[in-house]
Image (spheres, coloured by chain):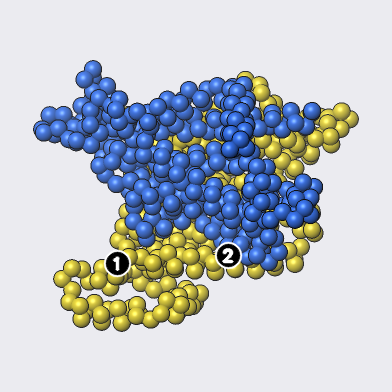
Chain colours: A yellow, B blue
Amino acid sequence: MVRFIVRRIGLICITLLVVSVVIFVITELLPGDVAAMILGKEATPQSVERLREELGLNRPAYERYLSWIGDVLQGNLGNSYAMKLPITDIVGRRLRYSAILAVFAFLIGVPLAVATGVWAGVYPNTKLDRLVSMTALVGISVPEFVTGLLLMLLFASTFHLLPSSSIILPGVNPLTSPQILIMPTLTIIAVLFAYIMRMTRANVIEVVRTDYVRTAILKGLPMRQVIVKHVLPNAMLPTITVIASNFGWMLGGLIIVENVFAYPGIGQLLLRSIENRDIPLLEIVSLIIAGTYAISNLIADLSYAALDPRVRLG
Amino acid sequence: MMVILSRLTSIRQSIINTLSMILRTWSGRIALPIVLLHLILAIFGPWLAPYSPTEMPASIEEFQNLPPSPQFWLGTDQYGRDVLSRVMCGATSLITTAAASTALGIVLGTSVGMSSGYKGGRVDEIIMRIMDGLMSFPTLLLALLVLFTLGPSRINIAATIGFVSMPAIARVVRSTTLSLKTMEFVQSARLRGESTTYIIFNELLPNVMPVLGVEASVRFSYAILSIASLGFLGLGVQPPSPDWGLMISQSRRFLVIAPWVALAPMGAIVSLIVGVNLLVDGIKQASGMAREKVEHG
């Protein structure tokens, strides 16, 4: 097991390295001169040249990459071009806000989806299963921004129950005003639920068909026990991978959901940095999002291995 | 010539077989009319639309945000344009861009996955590590970064979405290739001294096709979703094009006073994706049925 963990963590380091190179290459290929962009239209060629020198833009690309990644590894994230603030100050708060959304959506959505999926999978092709499956199919088909705007239309514009935007004023803790979290969380849950429920259902149906489950039923075990002891552990294995990859989807979905509700999380920050062509900020935010995804995949792999001896020994 | 002809007939036969099999599943029966309607819109939408999708009336105030009426069935938007015409014309660009990106993703993914799986060894290891690296990006983030660099245009969007879907397709094709490689008919072709090109095109490719069919339909549905999302975020098709995602994004400011401007493209996009996903379900069930038929004689 230890060897497995060490190898996995080694792989994650390589992956993160590849990710950082990709981000650097993409943002460096950018057409347009960063220095000219910062100084605006009235800048003289001399001042642009001076700023290029100052920012180190005249050095070769690999040298700049090495110094950038070295700084990042030492926790020195640099300054945002557009906001003129240290990136560490900007990112921390945004990250916390996004984490609040993600954690709420996950804590509510995943157990709900797994429970419904198991139930639908144990009784497939009944009327209720058809209904749940149809709902889930619609769930994966509706883009997040449509769900979000429909909720807004319903709860904010028509019934005036919830605030239509989730702007957080500086110094306010979102946990003290939970009403702004409801609609963004619901939007994320809608898609999350649909994906995980469909996967769980399919896996449960497969496991229920196996001989060992039939044996368990035929030897007279109560259905509850068959499900908890035989069906669940085996059906959950592939489901875990789906949950992890959904975490990655959710990070992308967060970008849209935060945009719909003007929620000041990491996704909004990403869009803002794209809008402002704020390269240092864009690089760090992308790295954080991709890194979170990689680590969630690592956690999935490890829990998979913990549950399945074939993976950790083979 | 005869060979090509007989192959064409066999392809037509297999398409007819697949279609009839899809029609035997209930999701396929619901899906086909929806998808057909969207395809008709995509081809004939611009001719059928009663008004121009982009032209604004001379006096915008007079026609701004009008509710649905016999004259404008789905109302008008903030620039006084007919919402129905805009929705009808939006299908073309969305469906063609999604189809182009899917085709690109399939071609890229198949070439990478098949050559990687067939070659094996160190090359395979390196290629798959790179694919893993690409897959460790949330797709929307990667698409946003690439489009940010290339700038939004329809070709760039199709290229980006196609590129982003490549690693997942490559992975599926590779694993299929790995299991095909050890089979007798491939081994015997190799022993006969056939060239690698021959083996890839005549032995491997036809057998990867069923997997590719399912994969392509899944990717097509993702592509629609991604393109609409990019449009919504303003990094996709640019105004004044009648793009559904963009229309929904622009209608946000008027959500309270003119909800129809948002609801019409929402209905269009949701029905299209529901239709495609149902079709995917139908195709999966149909290919499952086909497999059972083979297995049971």
Q: Residue A198's spot in the image, x, y percent?
A: 61, 36
**Which type of secondary structure does the marked residue at label 2 adopt?**
helix
Which amino acid type is shown beneath numbered disc 2? Answer: Thr
Q: In which quarter of the image is residue B147?
A: bottom left
- Residue corresponding to mark 1: A32
> Percent from the top left, x then y, of residue B22?
60, 26
Question: Farthest residue toward the top?
Answer: B70
* Res. A117 visible in picture: no
Disc 2: CA contacts within 10 A as few (<14), some (14-19) or many (>=20): many
Image coords of residue B252 (percent x, y)? 29, 39
Amino acid tagged 1: Gly
**B99 versus A6 height, above or below:** above
Q: Which residue is drawn at 68% across and 51% down?
A: B199
Residue beneath disc 2: A15
- In front: B116, or A297? B116
Answer above or below: position of A232 versus B116. Answer: above
Q: Quadrant of the N terminus of chain B?
A: top right
Say which element carries label 1.
Answer: loop
Vertical order, A256 against A44 (above or below): above
Residue B217 lies in what quarter of the image? Answer: top right
Badge 1: few (under 14), some or many (20 or more) residues near its Cα, within 10 Å? few
On the rendered image, what quadrant is the C terminus of chain B found in? top right
Q: Residue at x 20, y 78 (%)?
A: A45
